[in-house]
Amino acid sequence: GQNIDQPTEMTATEGAIVQINCTYQTSGFNGLFWYQQHAGEAPTFLSYNVLDGLEEKGRFSSFLSRSKGYSYLLLKELQMKDSASYLCAVGDSNYQLIWGAGTKLIIKP
Amino acid sequence: ETGVTQTPRHLVMGMTNKKSLKCEQHLGHNAMYWYKQSAKKPLELMFVYNFKEQTENNSVPSRFSPECPNSSHLFLHLHTLQPEDSALYLCASGKIEVYNEQFFGPGTRLTVL
């Protein structure tokens, strides 16, 4: 079967760094996506990794290891507005997205 | 403004009602999607339309009926729903040629009594 695992909830302090992990088992692989979803709002695209390694985009970075079926999203210099759910999704062999349940990130002052 | 709009934003309906959800995208995309999002569960892909043709129906019950009259509009017709169908219904659009991003609407929060 296809499976995406990520922690249900994480807590971090404003100004700190947090890493949100995602592991996956899918039929085929056509890239890994991270989306951010604030409560009551639409998910918004953060990053896309299709090759191994680290992709940096401002305060956010995303890492992929295809051999390990593993990715993480790294958030630096946390701000209160980063409190949201972070969704990991993998493109399968049919180019459809398989989604994780999301990680709710709580930022404390 | 994401360029994808959905109406209504909130809907409460009885199990015998018939209602429709509407999605409209202003991004020139050629693929549109319906997702169901339940609390603490992964997004569930329901339907996919590429160039107005349905290409995916993930074993969705027949009480959900999609319609895509053109590449900018997508509907989800609802009838005789069950309380377990209560969820956030999200519409998304994208370009088939540029696979790596989907743009989501704000969703319709549906409650079935």
Image (cartoon, helix red, strand yellow):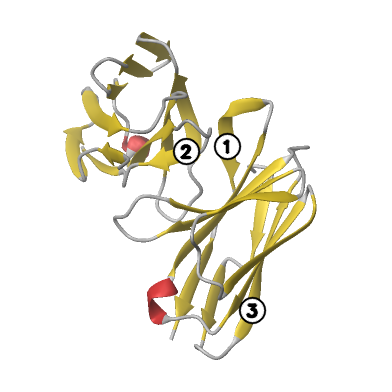
Q: Quadrant of the N terminus of chain B?
A: top right
- The residue that disc 3 covers is B19
Q: Residue at x 35, y 19 (%)?
A: A62
**Looking at the picture, how far across and down is residue A93, in whole percent?**
48, 30
- The residue that disc 1 covers is B102
- Which amino acid, by three-letter code, is at mark 3? Lys
Q: CA distance from mark 3 to mark 1?
A: 26 Å
Within 10 angstroms of label 1, few (less than 14), some, or many (20 or more) residues? many
Q: Is residue B109 above or below residue B36?
A: below
Q: Which chain's residue wears label 1?
A: B
Q: Which chain's residue wears label 3?
A: B
Of residues B62 and B22, the one nearer the viewer is B62
- Which amino acid, by three-letter code, is at mark 2? Leu
- Judged by depth in the image, the label closer to the viewer, 2 or 3, is 2
Q: Residue at x 32, y 40 (%)?
A: A2
Of residues A94 and A107, the one nearer the viewer is A94
Q: Is residue B59 left or right of residue A60?
A: right
Within 10 angstroms of label 2, few (less than 14), some, or many (20 or more) residues? many
Q: Which mark is residue A84?
A: none
Same-subunit check for callouts 2 and 3? no
Within 10 angstroms of label 3, few (less than 14), some, or many (20 or more) residues? some
Q: Which chain's residue wears label 2?
A: A
Image quadrant in which you'd find residue A67? top left
**Looking at the picture, how far across and down is residue A58, in whole percent?**
43, 15
**Looking at the picture, how far across and down is residue B102, in whole percent?**
58, 37
- The residue that disc 2 covers is A97
Mark 3 or 1 closer to N-term?
A: 3
C-beta proximity under 8 Å, tags 1 and 2: yes
- Which amino acid, by three-letter code, is at mark 1? Gln
